[in-house]
Structures are given as structure tokens and as C-alpha cells.
Amino acid sequence: MANKVAQYWGTGRRKTAVARVRLVPGTGAVTINERTLTDYVGGREPLMARELNLPFVATSNLGAYDIHANVFGGGVVSQVGAIRLGVARALLRLDPEFRTLLRGEGLLTRDPRAKERKKYGRKRARKRFQFSKR
């Protein structure tokens, strides 16, 4: 039987994006939907890499684990936010002692903000149609 490598799972959500994240001991490589981080986010990789590494920096595990994420829904920024929450939750499975560190940085809190639904009689959620007095 082959050696089993420790894997830690976490699920993250942000707006309409949902990410399933798997942490595997490694060198810190990031794979999103079978693509590299640079390939996936285009020209914003420094910003996104910093965002994804926040849970690792908070727990002093930078470069210790590879991130494998499957993510769908939303835009690229909200997808990275969902992956960040998934990474934080996976690190919590790795060591429950990380809870105070991650909670202190606000990395375990799901961002509840989402797009407000459109209302009838309005152009969008709150914008009104143009008023004409005459």
C-alpha cells in the first residue's frame, strides 16, 4: 500500500463564489482549477498571492503547504476570497490551536456581503427610474 500523504480540506465562500480547498505538505505552490495562480488571475498575482498567503503568515506556515483549489461562481477577486477562507478552515483542521491566531486576523469570518436583489418598480436594487415632472 502506498504512503498516505496528509491532506487537509476546507470550504470557503464569498459572494457567489464557492471554493473547495485541499492543503498538501509541499513547497507553497498554488493550483486553482488545475491552473497556476499566475495563469488564473492574470496580472494581479502579487496582490492575490498576498491574499492567499495571509492564513499561512498568521500561523507561521508560509511555504509549508501546497494549495489545490476547485472554485466556481463569482469573479476572480471573490473566488480568491473564498479560497482564503477555505485555506484558513483547512489550517484549522491541521491544528485547532490556530483558531485564536486566525480569528484574531479575521480570517475565519465569512464576509456576508452579497449583491442585493433587484426590486420591482426600480431600475436596480435601489436606483429609481428617471423622474420626469412634465
Image (spheres, rainbow, N blue to C red):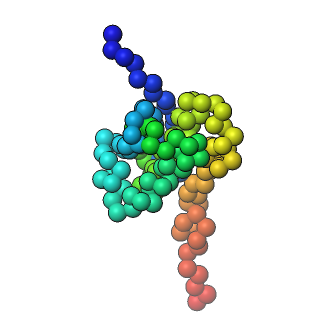
The residue under the point 49% across, 44% down is 62
- Look at the image and tell me in which quarter the C terminus lies: bottom right
Image quadrant where residue 46 sits: bottom left
Decide if residue 130 is on the left or right side of residue 72. Answer: right
Residue 87 lies, in percent from the top left, at 51, 40
Front residue (pair 133, 28): 28
- Look at the image and tell me in which quarter the N terminus lies: top left
The residue under the point 45% across, 24% down is 6
Residue 77 lies, in percent from the top left, at 46, 56
- The answer, for residue 14, to whether it is visible in the render is no
- Which residue occupies the extreme bottom position in the image? 134
Image quadrant where residue 117 sits: bottom right
Front residue (pair 44, 25): 25
The residue under the point 53% across, 69% down is 123
- The answer, for residue 104, to whether it is visible in the render is yes
Front residue (pair 47, 19): 47
Q: Does residue 4 sit above or below 1 in this rendering?
A: below
The residue under the point 40% across, 18% down is 4
Residue 103 lies, in percent from the top left, at 67, 44
Decide if residue 43 is on the left or right side of residue 86. Answer: left
Residue 132 lies, in percent from the top left, at 58, 85
Q: Does residue 22 sit above or below 62 in this rendering?
A: above
Decide if residue 71 is on the left or right side of residue 122. Answer: left
